[in-house]
Image (cartoon, helix red, strand yellow):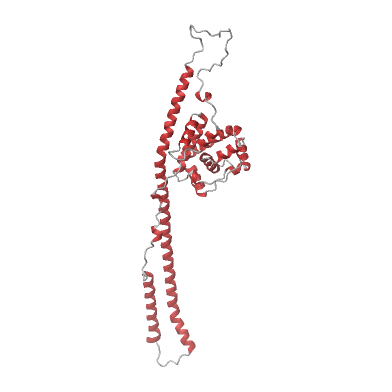
Amino acid sequence: MTRSSSPAATPPTSALDTPPERPVFGLIEAAALGLSAMWFLAVVAIFVLGGTPDAPAAGWSDILLRIVAVILPVLLIWVGAIALRSAQVMRDESQRLHAAIDGMRNAYIAHAQQAASVAEPSVTRKLDEIAAATRKTETALATFHTSRRDRPMPGIATTAAGGEVTDQGLLALGTPAEDLAAPLPSGQLIRALNFPETAEDEEGFAALRLALQDRKAAQVIQAAQDVLTLLSQDGIYMDDLRPDMARPEIWRQFAQGTRGRAVAALGGIRDRSSLALTSARMKQDPIFRDAAHHFLRRFDQMLAEFEEEASDTDISSLGETRTARAFMLLGRVAGTFD
């Protein structure tokens, strides 16, 4: 289940590339200039209009003190104005950054939904066709086996020419078709659990068609398809995950019933975003939670039977499939490996 590239995936970065132009002389500067002018008018009123003509000549220290007393308030006014202007700039930049991040997230979610809506119908249609063909085959086999007769037909001898009776096993009436089918090869099961790469992946669809004829494998595949479809709605795709692969003996221990720290390596998913989204969906969406627990049970049952006959190479290959990655992700969120 791969994603197709789309122009909608391009994030809207225009808000960051072209910041709005700000006036050099704004309201803050105008207020600071007005306060400075008022201060200078007050100084003139105090030192010029209110002074006494017969006052003694001031020394250098008095002159310097007066200059500082006049200039210092003006400097404080403009320092405050600069601080307010910087705070306004930072606030505007923060708002633009939040808007750009929201736009990128919305574009990503829209692209994920568009990709799912484009890719899912063709694969689902093929799976429905395969399921319909499987049901027809099983119905035909069941009809054939249940129409057999145990009694000999009239006029047909039941003994051989030499008088020997041929002992042939008879099939019980109503035997399910899956009990008569040959066991599914490990390679075909692994290929089916990885799902077809594209709509033109004939080998993948052939393995999937063969696996759907096996009742237990079909249950795991259908449960995996459900959770993969639900995860794709949040933009979580198994191809994007790069888990830490566990050794085959750890898979065997889990298949044999071991739980806890001994099998914690199976939860090798480290993608924090996928873990957070899956955990939130698990808590808030009861449909997703039921589908996830159903899938975990089916995979656990399949793994217990698969481990008995599989080699270490088969188990390693199984751990690299999309279905196994979904098991690692959901199992870690659900606390299966704790």
Question: Does 37 sit left or right of 154 as displayed?
Answer: left
Q: Return the residue nearer the eye: 32 or 119.
A: 119
Q: Position of residue 200 (x, y in %)?
A: 43, 38
Q: Is residue 286 visible?
A: no
Quadrant of the image containing the C terminus: top right
Vertical side of 143 occupied by 151: above or below? above
Query: Going by the picture, which residue comes out furthest to the top?
Result: 155
**Residue 9 appears in the picture as rendered:** yes
Residue 209, percent across and down? 47, 32
Quarter of the view holding residue 50: bottom left
Which of these two is toward me, 166 or 131?
166
Instruction: Please name the residue shown 40% across and 84% down the image.
Output: 46
The residue that appears at 61% across and 39% down in the rendered structure is: 248
**The one of 288 and 199 positioned closer to us in this rendering:** 199
All told, the count of numbered labels is 0
Q: Residue furthest front?
A: 161
Up the image or down, 331 lies above or below 12; here it is above
Question: Residue 95, percent across and down?
Answer: 41, 59
Residue 78 horizontal/vertical position (percent): 42, 74
